[in-house]
Image (tube, helix red, strand yellow):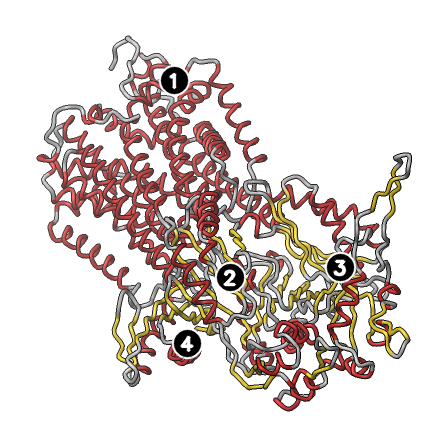
């Protein structure tokens, strides 16, 4: 041990330490890693809950006039049997109700979504001939959590009911929807509770009897007038084109009112004679959306009709950015909406929630790091504590970057994985720094080169540290095989903790000796002991015996 | 350090003390394990999570009109308006609210009937609010249900929390399979009643259509043909008269959609006087059809009216007809009410059905009279919990085996590897007791959750490292110094105590913030108390085990042990 010859490392730990100890790039690498971590933290998409690969879909087949039993027999059963042939399907649910049959297909969690959708569509298309004659074209609707669960929902309402009708509100919201669709990474947008414009022709049954008319006649009369025909081209003798078109007989409400439905005793009966005609909304669609919120006086206003615009994001994109873009865009429009008598309330904002959750956890992570640093100052000394504390962001930076590269997002679970591994991450660095410290204060340290001490101290604890870390990694790996939704939900833990642990080894072997060489010095052996030396002394006597 | 060294040496020297350590460990292990079946520590998959929003699902009986449903939602909204922490509410009648994770599995997207409604309730920010969303739900639920469910008989109101983890259809789900449709209907009602009577279960609902009275118009083929009409004509006019139809479309330059021309009877002339056959006949008699000769024929001439029950929808799962009976839990774990309900089912239904247990908690019921067979399967959160705990258990065993193999390669000794493994397994004492301690100090039940299990699995690695360091050091003392066994163990334990404490402190401090989180609290608590247990185990229990084993024999290899493992 006391030979002047340079120490030859046996373990990869020592080899790594040796390779980077004098390398001028080591410092750059450190700065680069920290920068990489920061960039990853900013650009990695943020979500509140981790992405879940849930595949499945619904097949909807309408068959007007059929009873549930009939639907079950001619639609559900044959479809179920066929879908049973697809590999990877976990559950098939059949719902047979009046006029319509729905088959819900649920794949095993983790089945590839695109593949599953394709297989489902393929199976239905292959078996179109099995469907009964009167059934309508089947509708295959794949589930898509990312596209189907909106990240933002906005409720629009009219401030003055008389000034703006529900149908006008719908038209305005349609324009807003179109505008928001322009925002990058916005996927599906939908409007719920829409009241669509329509001419309502409400026929009075008594008058119908009075004029001796049938409902069918009225329907026919309207149908035959409201036709759009393309322009007709005629030609002159010299070959010039003469274009003429037939104007649609119905242009406005009065045209509808004045439709002649029949001749009675020589005089024309107009539609307005037998029916009330108005330009209204689709009242036959019974569903409606309402809202109530606290007015200026803090009391709830009475429930009003509203329209909800929902916006979903594309998979793997940043919910925070999209939500911000949407709210900014709406804020810009606020004045013009005000002028039009439209108010809005953001009733859901997952982007904001995700950002809050992530920021809160990052803050917790910081606090934890500080707490550990303080603990280490007391036990190891402040320089040593600083070295160990530096390794934590470097390790997290590598882990975050790898998470970004593998297409993960920053979510609650990822950050919990970080918090969980935090207690384990510092261990490798602590063990290395402690051993360096011990070797520096060893009595034969005076005879040795500083570099050799660093490498040797690192190399010495290499094997047991590797074993211990591998043991911890091994406990995490089987967690990746937990199935079901829960397995998907906590996937970030087995995906990130082993990476972080492995990174902690490499960082500890590269940077701890490097920084220790820059910061720590050999103590002067003139009975001038470091304060730390005193309580170390006892240990040191025996540690020397370890070799 | 010296003190601790002599403390260990004293234990090792005295056989009685050694026995006492082993006995105490065994008692601690047994006692902590017993906390689970005795319900001192309660298990649940994931605890409730306070959110800034929750939903109310309203289901009036099938066949109710939108107006009836609206009366119920109005009642709920009026009730909720008294809550000071609510900022706004959105009511969606005849449709689901914008999809969220709960709605995704609870079938929100498929709601489009007049008897269905959802209310989204938004609250003030959870950080500035003293009452968690799930506490609020628990508080207001009884009043709302009592007041508003009474408006229309058969109405079910459900208050839906945002799930903390993966969403499930409901906390407790009974899937009842049978080919006997009628029997399924009656048995499901009985089961729903039992669930309703079970403590801790609320919002019980049978997911099947209620049957209601309908009228069927039976066309008389002969009369139709004789009057010069057609069946299609009859159908169409009836639909046109009462439902209405778009008969034409008008394109418009300044409208986002085509404008349909919608024809139907006016409201006054359409409405039927009251709900009976005569009223319906009277109304239909004034509706006339025109035949090919231009003559008017009243519709009642060609059809007869008959009363008939509605056709309820039929549900199948994996090619078997079934009915879902669902219930939510009222701030308790779903495990215990489920077991109670299971007990009650056996007790109350034994007279009518032969009941035998099948897989896990499931039952097979055979009707004593008809011989119809019903399979009762528990699903929902229970199934997810069972699956998750089973998977985590398997992951745990896999971790155990992997560590064991790793140690066997390292030490080349089964006994030493066994000691390390046993030591790390004992951290479960800390995990369970820790949950019990925290439960004493928290207002709500602190459940042992899936995240606690994750913490426990992670602990395995951490505590095996402690033992590893200890054994490693003892070995080097004995091999290099030729030290006598007991002294080597005592010295090794005392010197290794410091790094063990240090790393344990790091883990505990890093986990304190974790412990405050509602979902990952279990993980934090498991890590904190598990680490404490692990430290005690490795510093007292492991030395005793080491002393009891034939260390000299197990250390009998001369080569440098590190070289045996070309790691990295």
Chain letter, disc 1 residue: A
- Determine whether A63 is above or below A141 in the image: below
Circles 4, 2 touching at the beta carbon (< 8 Å)? no
Say which residue label 3 marks.
B249
Q: CA distance from mark 4 to mark 3?
A: 52 Å
Q: Is residue B82 left or right of residue A139?
A: right
Front disc: 4 or 3: 3
Q: Position of residue A255 (x, y in %)?
A: 87, 63
Circles 2, 3 touching at the beta carbon (< 8 Å)? no
Q: Secondary structure at mark 1?
A: loop
Say which residue label 4 marks.
B195
Front disc: 4 or 2: 2
Q: Is residue B252 left or right of residue B506?
A: right
Residue B275 is drawn in which quadrant? bottom right
Q: CA distance from mark 3 to mark 1?
A: 97 Å
Residue B178 is drawn in which quadrant? bottom left
């Amino acid at each position: 041990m006391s030979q002047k010859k340079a120490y030859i490392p046996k373990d990869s730990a020592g080899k790594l330490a040796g390779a980077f100890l004098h390398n001028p790039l080591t410092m750059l690498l450190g700065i680069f890693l920290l920068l990489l971590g920061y960039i990853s933290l900013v650009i990695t998409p943020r979500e509140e809950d981790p992405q879940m690969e849930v595949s499945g879909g619904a097949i909807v087949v309408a068959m007007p006039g059929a009873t549930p039993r009939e639907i079950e027999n001619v639609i559900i059963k044959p479809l179920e049997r066929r879908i049973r042939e697809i590999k990877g399907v976990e559950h098939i649910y059949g719902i047979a109700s009046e006029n319509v049959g729905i088959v819900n297909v649920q794949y095993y969690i983790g089945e590839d979504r695109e593949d599953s959708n394709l297989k489902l569509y393929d199976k239905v298309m292959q078996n179109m001939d099995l469907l009964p004659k009167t059934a309508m074209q089947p509708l295959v609707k794949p589930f898509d959590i990312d596209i189907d669960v909106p990240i933002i929902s906005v409720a629009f309402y009219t401030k003055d009911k008389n000034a703006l009708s529900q149908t006008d509100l719908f038209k305005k919201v349609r324009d807003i929807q179109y505008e928001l669709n322009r925002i990058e990474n916005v996927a599906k947008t939908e409007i719920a509770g829409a009241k669509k414009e329509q001419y309502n022709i409400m026929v009075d049954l008594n008058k119908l009897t009075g004029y001796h008319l049938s409902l069918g006649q009225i329907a026919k009369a309207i149908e035959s007038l409201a036709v759009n025909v393309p322009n007709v081209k005629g030609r002159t003798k010299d070959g010039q084109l003469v274009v003429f078109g037939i104007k649609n007989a119905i242009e406005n409400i009065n045209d509808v009112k004045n439709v002649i439905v029949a001749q009675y005793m020589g005089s024309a009966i107009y539609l307005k004679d037998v029916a009330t005609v108005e330009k209204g909304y689709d009242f036959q669609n019974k569903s409606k959306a309402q809202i109530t919120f606290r007015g200026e006086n803090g009391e709830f206003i009475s429930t009003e009709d509203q329209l909800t615009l929902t916006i979903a994001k594309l998979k793997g994109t940043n919910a925070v950015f999209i939500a911000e873009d949407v709210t900014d865009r709406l804020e810009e429009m606020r004045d013009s909406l005000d002028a039009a008598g439209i108010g809005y309330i953001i009733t859901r904002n997952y982007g904001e929630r995700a950002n809050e959750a992530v920021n809160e956890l990052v803050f917790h992570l910081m606090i934890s790091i500080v707490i550990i640093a303080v603990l280490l100052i007391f036990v190891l000394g402040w320089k040593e504590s600083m070295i160990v504390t530096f390794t934590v962001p470097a390790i997290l930076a590598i882990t975050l970057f790898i998470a970004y590269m593998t297409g993960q997002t920053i979510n609650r679970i990822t950050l919990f994985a970080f918090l969980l591994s935090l207690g384990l991450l510092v261990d490798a660095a602590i063990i290395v720094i402690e051993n360096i410290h011990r070797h520096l204060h060893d009595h034969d340290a005076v005879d040795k080169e500083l570099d050799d001490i660093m490498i040797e101290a690192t190399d010495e604890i290499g094997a047991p540290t590797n074993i211990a870390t591998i043991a911890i990694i091994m406990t995490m790996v089987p967690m990746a095989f937990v199935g079901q939704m829960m397995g998907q939900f906590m996937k970030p833990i087995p995906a990130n903790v082993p990476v972080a642990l492995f990174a902690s080894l490499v960082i500890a072997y590269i940077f701890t000796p490097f920084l220790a060489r820059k910061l720590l010095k050999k103590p002067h052996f003139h009975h001038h002991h470091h304060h730390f030396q005193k309580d170390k002394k006892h240990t040191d006597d025996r540690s020397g015996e370890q070799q | 350090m010296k003190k601790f060294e002599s403390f260990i040496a004293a234990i090792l020297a005295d056989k009685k003390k050694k026995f006492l350590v082993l006995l105490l460990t065994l008692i601690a292990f047994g006692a902590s394990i017993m906390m689970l079946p005795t319900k001192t520590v309660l298990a649940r998959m994931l605890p409730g999570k306070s959110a800034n929003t929750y939903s109310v699902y309203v289901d009036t009986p099938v066949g109710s009109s939108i107006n009836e449903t609206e009366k119920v939602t109005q009642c709920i909204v009026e009730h909720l308006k008294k809550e000071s922490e609510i900022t706004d509410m959105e009511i969606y009648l005849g449709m689901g609210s914008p999809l969220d994770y709960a709605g995704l599995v609870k079938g929100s997207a498929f709601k489009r009937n007049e008897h269905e409604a959802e209310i989204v309730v938004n609250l003030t920010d959870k950080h500035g609010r003293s009452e968690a969303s799930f506490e609020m739900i628990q508080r207001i639920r009884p009043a709302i249900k009592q007041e508003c469910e009474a408006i229309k008989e058969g109405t079910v109101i459900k208050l839906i929390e945002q799930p903390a983890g993966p969403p499930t259809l409901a906390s407790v789900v009974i899937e009842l399979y049978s080919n006997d449709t009628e029997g399924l209907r009656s048995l499901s009602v009985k089961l729903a009643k039992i669930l309703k009577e079970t403590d801790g279960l609320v919002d019980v609902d049978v997911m099947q259509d209620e049957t209601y009275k309908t009228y069927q118009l039976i066309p008389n083929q002969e009369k139709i043909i004789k009057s010069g009409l057609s069946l299609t004509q009859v159908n169409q006019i009836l639909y046109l008269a009462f439902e209405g139809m778009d008969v034409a479309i008008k394109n418009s330059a300044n409208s986002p959609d085509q404008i349909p021309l919608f024809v139907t009877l006016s409201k006054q002339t359409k409405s039927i006087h009251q709900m009976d056959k005569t009223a319906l006949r009277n109304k239909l008699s004034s509706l006339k059809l025109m035949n090919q000769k231009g003559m008017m024929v009243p519709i009642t001439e060609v059809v007869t009216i008959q009363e008939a029950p509605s056709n309820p929808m039929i549900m199948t799962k994996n090619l078997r007809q079934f009915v879902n009976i669902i219930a939510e839990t009222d701030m308790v774990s779903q495990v215990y009410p489920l077991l109670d309900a299971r007990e009650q089912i056996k007790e109350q239904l034994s007279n009518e059905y032969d009941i035998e247990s099948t897989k896990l908690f499931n039952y097979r019921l055979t009707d004593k009279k008809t011989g119809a067979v019903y399979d009762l399967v528990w699903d929902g959160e229970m199934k997810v919990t069972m699956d998750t705990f089973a998977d985590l258990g398997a992951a745990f065993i896999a971790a155990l085996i992997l560590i064991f193999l790793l140690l066997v390669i390292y030490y080349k000794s089964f006994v030493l590897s066994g000691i390390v493994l046993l030591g790390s397994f004992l951290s479960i004492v800390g995990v369970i007791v820790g949950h019990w301690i925290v439960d004493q100090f928290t207002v709500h039940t602190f459940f042992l959750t899936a995240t606690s299990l994750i913490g426990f699995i992670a602990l395995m690695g951490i505590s095996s490292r402690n033992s590893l360091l200890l054994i490693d050091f003892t070995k080097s003392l004995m091999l290099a110094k030729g030290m006598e066994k007991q002294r080597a163990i005592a010295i090794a334990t005392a010197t290794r105590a410091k790094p063990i404490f240090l790393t344990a402190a790091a883990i505990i401090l890093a986990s304190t913030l974790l412990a405050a989180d509602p979902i990952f609290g279990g993980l934090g608590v498991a890590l904190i108390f598990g680490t404490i247990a692990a430290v005690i185990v490795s510093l007292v229990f492991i030395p005793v085990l080491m002393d009891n084993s034939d260390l000299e024999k197990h250390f009998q290899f001369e080569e440098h042990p590190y070289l045996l493992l070309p790691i990295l």
